[in-house]
Image (spheres, rainbow, N blue to C red):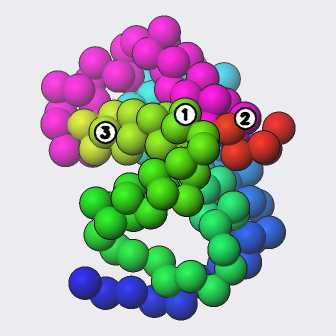
Amino acid sequence: MVSQQHPFTPTEHLAQAERNEKLANALVDLGSDHLDWVVTIVFYSALHYIYSKLPLGRKICSNYIKFEKEISIHFSNKPTIYKNYKGLKDKSRNARYHPHFADEYSKDEKFIESILLKLEKLKNGLGIS
């Protein structure tokens, strides 16, 4: 397992999350044929929102199982954060590694709306408006 020092400050994580979210919304607004990428962009936006609320100086773990455990422990009083993170992670993985899901996601505007809603719920749980 490779760990590294925190590459961003909380403010930088927040700024990156907002940039990612803006890009995802722009793809939706453009009516892009690549809406499957919205899922992945939104997932990485969620990661940065979460990192912006974790203690500064912590190590970033490249192991998603350990990171999920950290999220569930750190935000144990806010289970919707983990629930929405996990949903976004799973859908992003499907979009990246399973072509039939990617194709399905690209055609389903209601699904994309649900992904954006998961991100909003995660942000609300984190106290980000």
Label disc, if present, on residue 80 of the rendered structure = 1
Residue contact at pointers 1 and 3, CB within 8 angstroms: no
What residue is at 37 percent from the left and 14 percent from the top? 107
What residue is at 45 percent from the left and 35 percent from the top? 83
Relative to 55, 108 lies left or right = left
C-alpha gap between disc 2 and disc 3: 20 Å
Crowd around label 2: few <14 · some 14–19 · many ≥20 (10 Å): few
The part of the chain drawn in magenta is 95-124
Q: Which residue is mark 2?
A: 124
C-alpha gap between disc 1 and disc 3: 15 Å
Q: Is residue 126 visible?
A: yes
Name the front one of labels 2 and 3.
Answer: 2
Crowd around label 3: few <14 · some 14–19 · many ≥20 (10 Å): some
Give residue 77's quadrant in the image. top right
Task: Where is residue 80? Give x, y as percent.
Answer: 55, 33
Residue type at mark 1? Thr
Query: Is 99 covered by the magenta stretch?
Result: yes
Residue contact at pointers 2 and 3, CB within 8 angstroms: no
Q: Is residue 46 visible?
A: no
Magenta segment's dominant SS is helix
Residue contact at pointers 2 and 1, CB within 8 angstroms: yes
Q: Which residue is mark 3?
A: 90
Q: Secondary structure at mark 2?
A: helix
Q: Secondary structure at mark 1?
A: helix
Task: Where is residue 15? Give x, y as percent.
Answer: 76, 61
C-alpha gap between disc 2 and disc 1: 9 Å
Task: Where is residue 99? Give x, y as percent.
Answer: 18, 33
The numbered mark, 2 or 3, whose residue comes first in the sequence reads 3
* Residue 43, above or below 14: above
Query: Is 98 covered by the magenta stretch?
Result: yes
Task: Where is residue 25? Give x, y as percent.
Answer: 66, 32
- Relative depth, front residue between 69 and 98: 69
